[in-house]
Amino acid sequence: MKVHSKKFGGLILGLVIIIFVIISVICYVNHSNGLIKKQQEMQKSPVKSLRYTLPKHTKVSDWQLILVNKQHPRTSEIQFNKVTVDGKQMDQRIEKPLNDFRAGAKIAGYDTTLVSAYRSIADQSEVYQNSLRQNEANGMDEKAATKLTQSVIQTPGSSEHQTGLAVDVAGNDALAKYPALMAQMDEFKSQRWLIKHASDYGFVLRYLNDSKSISQTGIDYESWHFRYVGIANARYMVQHHLTLEAYRNMLRKAAQN
Ligand SMILES: [Zn+2]
């Protein structure tokens, strides 16, 4: 009798273990199937799924999304109503957002300087030629001088400052240490505050600090150059870590689908 119940007990234990193993395997397979399915869905239609999250009524042709860069130069001056703030001209439509942005920084404890705003093609041409002449005066031949100038100054026609929607803004302490504007200005809390809160006022830090963004914009990280795109666009671009180039491509693709 004793031997029988021992055998029976062993059988039950064995059965329990087998059932447990089967259930575990089923659960595992289901889980990984779910993951694979999810990944496949995301790979299939990243643009389609993003379309539903894009800000509503946004078009790539909206005035605040104008693109000027090396691949999209403007050879004639862009027309818009200009206002002057702190001695710098800009598109009148960004006067209030910019004032609010800097007022926000001040309330947070940071005084700021508007270093630069609108530059006409003629202005840009002058800056470019001055740099070229300076390099040549320093003994460089024309090729070397041009190369160095183009590494730091946009060729006339391809600077975003021509739009009147781009501003160079610096925390006063950051500017005091780096008067020529350097990426390291973000060592300062003031500059980091500007970068972090820009989108609340409709601005984005235009030239981001990662290789993918740099390859899209063609411009190295600039911790001071902000571009007005409107609050909804700015928030979306920051949330998804998009350059203006990438965001415009996404809007164009979404409009085609
Ligand atoms: Zn700038």
Image (cartoon, rainbow, N blue to C red):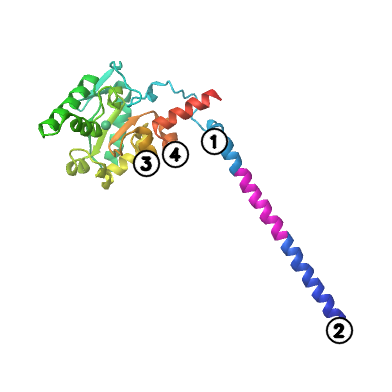
Magenta extent:
23-38
Q: Position of residue 69 (x, y in %)?
A: 33, 27
Q: Residues within 10 Å of mark 4 (few under 14, many from 20)?
A: few
Q: Nearer the viewer, mark 4 or mark 3?
A: 3
Looking at the rendered image, the quarter that the N terminus falls into is bottom right
Q: Earlier in the sequence, mark 1 or mark 2?
A: 2
Cβ at disc 1 under 8 Å from ligand 1? no
- The answer to the question of whether label 1 and label 3 lie on touching residues, with beta carbons closer than 8 A, is no
- Give me the C-alpha separation between circle 2 and circle 3: 75 Å
Q: Nearer the viewer, mark 1 or mark 3?
A: 3
- The answer to the question of whether label 2 and label 4 lie on touching residues, with beta carbons closer than 8 A, is no
Q: Callout 2: helix, strand or loop? A: helix
Q: Callout 3: helix, strand or loop? A: helix
- The answer to the question of whether label 2 and label 3 lie on touching residues, with beta carbons closer than 8 A, is no
Q: Earlier in the sequence, mark 2 or mark 4?
A: 2
Residue type at numbered disc 4: Gln
- Give me the C-alpha separation between circle 1 and circle 4: 16 Å
Cβ at disc 3 under 8 Å from ligand 1? no
Q: Nearer the viewer, mark 2 or mark 4?
A: 2
Residue 107 as seen in the image, left or right of residue 52: left
Which of the labelled discs sits on residue 46, or is there none?
Answer: 1
Q: Earlier in the sequence, mark 1 or mark 4?
A: 1
Residue type at numbered disc 1: Pro
